Amino acid sequence: MRVLVAGSGGREHALVWKIAQSPLVDGVWAAPGSDAMADDATLVPDVAAGDSEGLIRVARENQIELVVIGPEDPLADGVADRLRESGLRVFGPSAAAARLEGSKTFAREFMARHAIPQPAFATFTVLGEAIDHAKGLAGPCVVKADGLAAGKGVAVCDGPTDAEAALREIMADRRFGAAGDQVLVEERLEGEEASYYAISDGERVVTLASAQDHKRALDGDRGENTGGMGAYAPAPVVSPAVEKQVLEEIVHPTLRGMREEGAPFSGVLYVGLMIDEAGRPRVVEFNVRFGDPETQCLFVQMTGDLVPLLDGAARGQLEPQTVAAEDAAVCVVLASGGYPRSYETGKPIEGLAEAAAREGVVVFHAGTALDGEHFVTRGGRVLGVTARGPDVPTARARAYAAADEIRFEGLHRREDIAARALGR
Ligand code: AMP
Ligand code: GLY
C-alpha cells in the first residue's frame, strides 16, 4: 500500500516514521513534509497540507491508497471531505466532525447536549460582557478563544484581573484573529491532566495509550501555554478504573452523539482530560487529530502495526483489537528561545546523530530544514527527542541523555518532563 501523509511537523514526522515500518506499506509520501522525513518518505514540498487539489493530484500520480491528514487546520477546512469526494480513502474527520476541535463553543455545547462531563462555561462575543462575567466569578477561571490558535489561545487565570487581560488580548488586540471573535470563560478545573487517544471509524473504537503533555513553557508548569513542551506515556493517573469511565462517559457518548447529529466521527479522537482527586475525569478539550508531541511517545512505544488502524478507520471497517506497545516513552521538546512568542530561526543544530545513536531513542523534527547538508532551526518547536523504555524513569533518562547531545543557539527545554511520574 502507498500512503500519503499531509503535514510537516513533529507529529507528521512520527506518522511517516511509523507508517514506513509497516509490512503493508511499500511507499510513503509526505506533503509538504520536511527535509528530515526524506529517510522514510518521498517529499512533495510544493503541496501544503491544506491544498486539497494538490493532495488529490499527488495521490493520483502515485497510486496512493490512503491519505493521512496530520494537523487540525486542514481537517477543520474540509480537506478530508474534498479528498473523499474525489474517491480517495482518508484518515481524518469531516469538517462537520472536526468542529469538536475547531470550535470550542461547538464542543462545549455538544458535550452539554450529551451530558458528557465538563466544566461550567459561558460564551461571549462582546468584550464588556465577558469581562463582567469574569468579574462576577471573582475567582479562578479559564479564558479561551473559540477557534484554532495552535494550542496558545487559552489563558488559565487566577482571578478577574488576569482574565480581563486575556480577554482584551483575544478580543481587542485580536492576537488570534478571527479565532477570537467568540470567547469562552470556563470554570477552572483542578486535578491532574492526561490525554487519551481512541481511533474510530465512526462506530467502533480501538484505544491507544494515555499520555501526559506539558503545555506550559517553563518548569513547574509556569509560563505561557505552548503547543506542548514534552510528553510521556502512559499517564499513571489514567488507571483502569479511570479509563473505564473515560470510555463509558466520554468516548462512546461522543461518538454516539456525533452519529446522532449527522456528523459521524472517523479518525483519532484525542480527549484532553482533567482527573480530580476522586478519580473523576472531565473534558478539558477535544482534538480531532493526534497530539503533538504525545504522538511521538505513542508511536515510539507502539510495537504493533499502526497502518491497519488508520486504514480500517478510513474504510469504515475498523477491527476491534488491543494495540501492542512497550511499557513507556518520553519525549523532550527542544524549542527556540522565545517560543511561544517570537523567536529566531536558521540556527545550526549540532549533535543530532549522537542523540539518535542512543538506545531506544528517535529524534523527531518539528521545525528544522536542511541548509546544505546541515540541519538548522525553522520553527518554535524544533525537535522532539523521544525514547522508549521498560518504565518511565528509564525512558526519561534516555530522552534527557540524548537531548543533552543536541545544541543550537537559544535552545530552550523543560527539565521536568515526566518528573511527575517518577514519584509514583
Ligand atoms: P485547551 O487548548 O483547551 O486544551 O487548553 C490548554 C490548556 O489549558 C489545557 O491543557 C489545560 O492545562 C488548561 N485548561 C483548559 N481548560 C481548562 C479548564 N477548564 N480548567 C483548567 N485548566 C484548563
Ligand atoms: N500537545 C497538545 C496538542 O497536540 O494539542
Image (cartoon, rainbow, N blue to C red):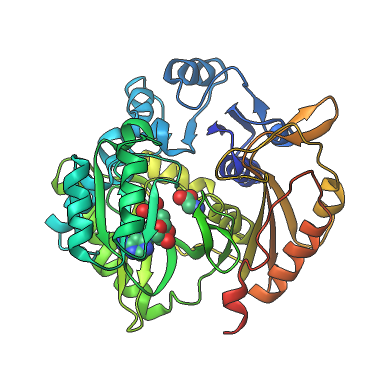
Q: Position of residue 209 (x, y in %)?
A: 49, 64
Ligand 1 shows up in the quarter that is bottom left
Q: Residue at x 63, y 65 (%)?
A: 329
Q: In which quadrant will I find the C terminus? A: bottom right
The extreme front residue here reads 161
Q: Nearer the viewer, residue 90 or 193?
A: 193
Up the image or down, 364 lies above or below 198; here it is above
Residue 294 shows up from this direction: yes
Up the image or down, 78 lies above or below 61; here it is below
Q: Position of residue 14 (x, y in %)?
A: 61, 46
Q: Quadrant of residue 243?
A: bottom left
Question: Is residue 201 shown left or right of residue 291?
Answer: left
Residue 391 shows up from this direction: no
Q: Position of residue 172 (x, y in %)?
A: 31, 36
| Badge count | 0
Q: Residue at x 60, y 84 (%)?
A: 423
Question: Is residue 136 shown left or right of residue 272?
Answer: left
Q: Nearer the viewer, residue 322 or 125?
A: 125
Q: Position of residue 89 (x, y in %)?
A: 41, 31
Up the image or down, 310 lies above or below 141; here it is above
Q: In which quadrant will I find the N terminus? A: top right
Q: Quadrant of residue 38?
A: top right
Q: Residue at x 60, y 45 (%)?
A: 339
Q: Nearer the viewer, residue 173 or 261?
A: 173
